[in-house]
Amino acid sequence: MELRTLEYFVAVAEEESFTRAAARCRVAQPAISQQIRALEHELGEPLFERTSRSVRLSRGGDVLLPFARQALAATAAAVAEFAARSGVLSGSLRIGTVDGVERTDLPAILGEFHRQHANVTVELIGGTSAELLARIGHGALEAAVVALPTMPLPGTLEMLTMLEDEIVAVVPAADDRAKLARLPLTDLAGPTTITYARDSGLRTLLEESFAACDGDEAFRPGCETNDVALQVALVKAGIGTALSAQTDPSLHDEKVAIIPLQPSVRYTKAMVWRTQPAPAAPLRALLAIAGHRTV
């Protein structure tokens, strides 16, 4: 069993496609297919369930995946560690990012990291907070910047705050409510509400905050999109009131007004990583820069 074969296996598992996996690994698709068939023959059972439209892990593939990830991570960590001992940090970092990460310290941190460690390759992988936290948990990512869930993180994860933010109401500037000091969250439950889609961590936060208010209605917004610029455009079109992240630059529009909510709906975006196994040299270097900037 070769590391390259395990790399191909993990790529197919994560991409759910031999074609996308080949592009990710920069090899021809037949080469990946051949290696996977050889691995299946070696292990004695199929690793994927293949149809004309999809590729999914079999039960055997589910068993192999965490071992493959651990083997690849351990190898990469060993290479990076010995490169660091020689005084030249190298290797790679896979960092998950949610929407709005550009408003955190992450871009500046990565800029400084690149200046100090140009030989380290950084790959940024987008996703929702729940998806990225799961990928950190099973080792597919070294770290991620996510919107923290309301429940405490598992003890195996550590975090560093990147941004403190809150959800606000966005109304047309000419709206009579624009002069209000606060707008009750319970007034924003129905079809004239515009906010994030169900796959967003901020939508979950809003639903939990609304439920805590003991409102008479369920939280059922009329328009759902994670694109805040579109949320603002819909407000200006007279469709309703948006519930959006206060720090999003799309809210800097003279045609809309921003009103704090009652009660406040605050959230934190943080860099999260696993403590076990211990972070490899590239991640330790990134965390050193991040810690210095956010103290």
Image (cartoon, rainbow, N blue to C red):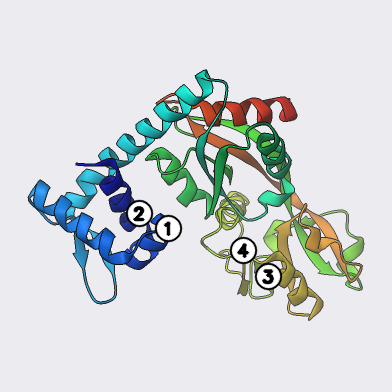
* Helix, strand or loop for disc 4: loop
Quick check: marks 1 and 2 in contact, CB under 8 Å? yes
Residue 103 visible in image: yes
Q: Nearer the viewer, mark 1 or mark 2?
A: 1
The dot on residue 196 is 4
| Residue for badge 2 | 11
User: Which type of secondary structure does the marked residue at label 3 adopt?
Assistant: strand
* Residue at point 73%, 79% (across, down): 239
Q: Position of residue 274 (x, y in %)?
A: 46, 31
Tell me the CA gap for discs 1 and 4: 30 Å
Q: Which residue does the numbered mark 1 point to in the structure image?
A: 24
Asked where in the image residue 68 lies, by quadrant, the reply is top left
- Which is in the foreground here, disc 2 or disc 3? 2
| Residue closer to the observer: 249 or 25 | 25
Task: Determine which of the numbered discs, if any, sits on residue 193 in the image.
Answer: 3
Q: CA distance from mark 2 to mark 3?
A: 40 Å
